[in-house]
Image (cartoon, rainbow, N blue to C red):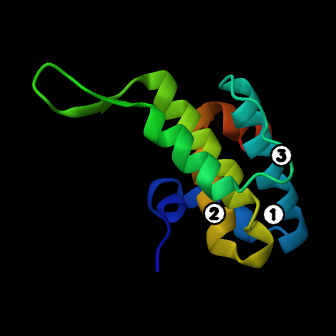
Amino acid sequence: MVTRLEQVHPDIATWLQGLPHDRQVELVHDLALHAVQSTGLSVPPEATDLSEWAADIDSKGWSRDADGQWVQTAEAFAHARAAFALRDASTAGLGSEATKDSLYESIVALGPDFVRTKLGLTT
């Protein structure tokens, strides 16, 4: 199955795949923490169920517009993406799909240019 990272940022996915698994896990965790902090969220306490925490942050960001359509502000969207990045990073050690999902969410929260620079992928 092709991940969102592989679909949207195939070069980053390929680069990530070339790293040792332990380095991949460390990298996505560091980026996810940065995404959480840079979007203004507080890192949750260690005992927090990150799946519930991320779902709660995501659900708080939705409202209906004048036409009755569900919308999310840019800030709420970034919060949700950062929360899901941290959630996925917490299980990255279990498999490459969670690692790729975490990195994808961090890219969405932080922006591709920032992440490419942070990873040293800019020319």
> Looking at the image, which is closer to me, 42 or 6?
42
Q: Can you give x and y, in whole percent of width and height, for residue 46 in the image? A: 86, 50
| Count of marks placed on residues | 3
Q: Which residue is mark 3?
A: 30
Tell me which corner region of the image, top left, top right, bottom left or bottom right, holds residue 28. bottom right
User: How far is mark 1 from mark 2, CA to CA?
Assistant: 9 Å
Per the rendering, the mark at residue 100 is 2
Q: Which residue is mark 1?
A: 24
9 in relation to 94, above or below: above
1 in relation to 55, above or below: below
- Mark 1 element type: helix
6 in relation to 30, above or below: below
User: How far is mark 1 from mark 3, CA to CA?
Assistant: 10 Å
Q: Can you give x and y, in whole percent of width and height, for residue 123 in the image? A: 71, 37
> Looking at the image, which is closer to me, 113 or 21?
21
- The structure residue drawn at horizontal position 53% and vertical position 49%, both measured from the top left corner, is 55
Amino acid type for the residue under numbered disc 3: Asp
For discs 1 and 3, the disc positioned in front in the rendered view: 3
Question: Pointers 1 and 2 in contact (CB under 8 A)?
Answer: no
Q: Can you give x and y, in whole percent of width and height, for residue 34 in the image? A: 77, 35
- Mark 3 element type: helix
- The structure residue drawn at horizontal position 57% and vertical position 33%, both measured from the top left corner, is 79
Q: Residues within 10 Å of mark 1 (few under 14, many from 20)?
A: many
Per the rendering, the mark at residue 68 is none
Question: Pointers 1 and 3 in contact (CB under 8 A)?
Answer: no
Tell me which corner region of the image, top left, top right, bottom left or bottom right, holds residue 40. top right
Amino acid type for the residue under numbered disc 1: Gln
